[in-house]
Image (cartoon, rainbow, N blue to C red):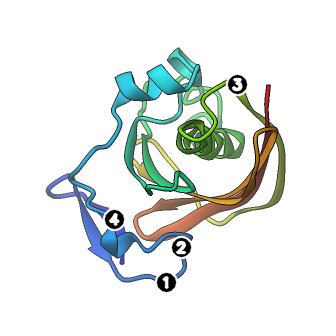
Amino acid sequence: MCPILDDMTKTIQPVASDRYLIDLSKIDFDQIMGDVEMIESINPHRGDMRHLDEVIWRNEECTQGVGIKHIRDDEFWVAGHIPGRPLFPGVLQIEAGAQLSSFVLRHRFPDGFLGFTRVTDCSFRGQVVPGDTLILLTREVKANRRRFITDCQGIVNDKLVFEAQISGMVF
C-alpha cells in the first residue's frame, strides 16, 4: 500500500502498491518521527536548501526511511523554473532524497558530515508541482564509516516520479 494525499481532507490515504523500496502499508503516516527542528538538529541544511519537511519513519537498523517534502508555491525556484508552469527541479528531488538518506544514516554514523558525491541510475517519471506532497523513500544498499550508497524514490499521488541511487562520503 502506498499513501497518497487526499485533496479533500489533506490527509495521506493508503493505496496498494508493490513498486516501492519500502512496504508503505506498514507505515503510519499520521505519526511524525522527525519535524523540522529534529531534522535540522541532524542535517546541516537550512533555509532554501532544506528539502525535507518531515521524517515519518525509519527502521530500527537505520537502513530505511520515509520522509515528506511539501512543495510550496513560495519556494525560490518557482518563478524561474518554467515560468507560468513551475516544475520542482529534478536536481532538488534528488537533493531531497539525499537529505532523507543522510538523516537516516546519521543515526549510525554520528560523527562527520554525510556528503552527497554521486547519483546513478536516475529516472524521472512524472512532474512535481507546487501543492504536491512528495513522499521520499530511502533504503541502504551499502554503508560503512567512510562511504554509503542508498536507493531513493519519490512518489506523488501514488505515482513514482523519480528514482535514483545516491552515493556519499562521511567527511
Q: CA distance from mark 4 to mark 2?
A: 13 Å
| Proximity of marks 1 and 4: CB atoms separated by less than 8 Å | no
Question: Which residue type carries mark 3?
Answer: Phe
Any part of residue 99 in sight: yes
The residue at which mark 3 appears reads as 113
Give x and y (percent) for residue 111.
66, 25
User: Counting residues from the N terminus, which is met first, the one under dot 3 or under dot 1?
Assistant: 1
Q: Earlier in the sequence, mark 3 or mark 4?
A: 4
Q: Residue at x 48, y 36 (%)?
A: 52
How far is disc 2 from disc 3 in space, using C-alphas? 28 Å
Look at mark 4 in the image and give the residue it sits on: 4
Residues marked 2 and 3 touching at CB (< 8 Å)? no
Task: Quadrant for the N terminus, please.
Answer: bottom left
Residue drawn at the location 54% of the way across and 44% of the way down:
104
Mark 3–mark 1 Cα distance, whole angstroms, equals 33 Å
The part of the image, by quadrant, that contains residue 35 is top left
Image depth: mark 4 or mark 2 in front:
2
**Residue at the spot of label 1:** 18
The label number, if any, that marks residue 20 in the structure image: 2
Relative to 156, is 95 above or below? Answer: above
C-alpha gap between disc 1 and disc 4: 14 Å
Amino acid type assigned to the residue bearing label 4 in the image: Ile
Work out whether mark 4 precedes mark 2 in sequence or the reverse, and give the earlier one: 4
Helix, strand or loop at disc 1? loop
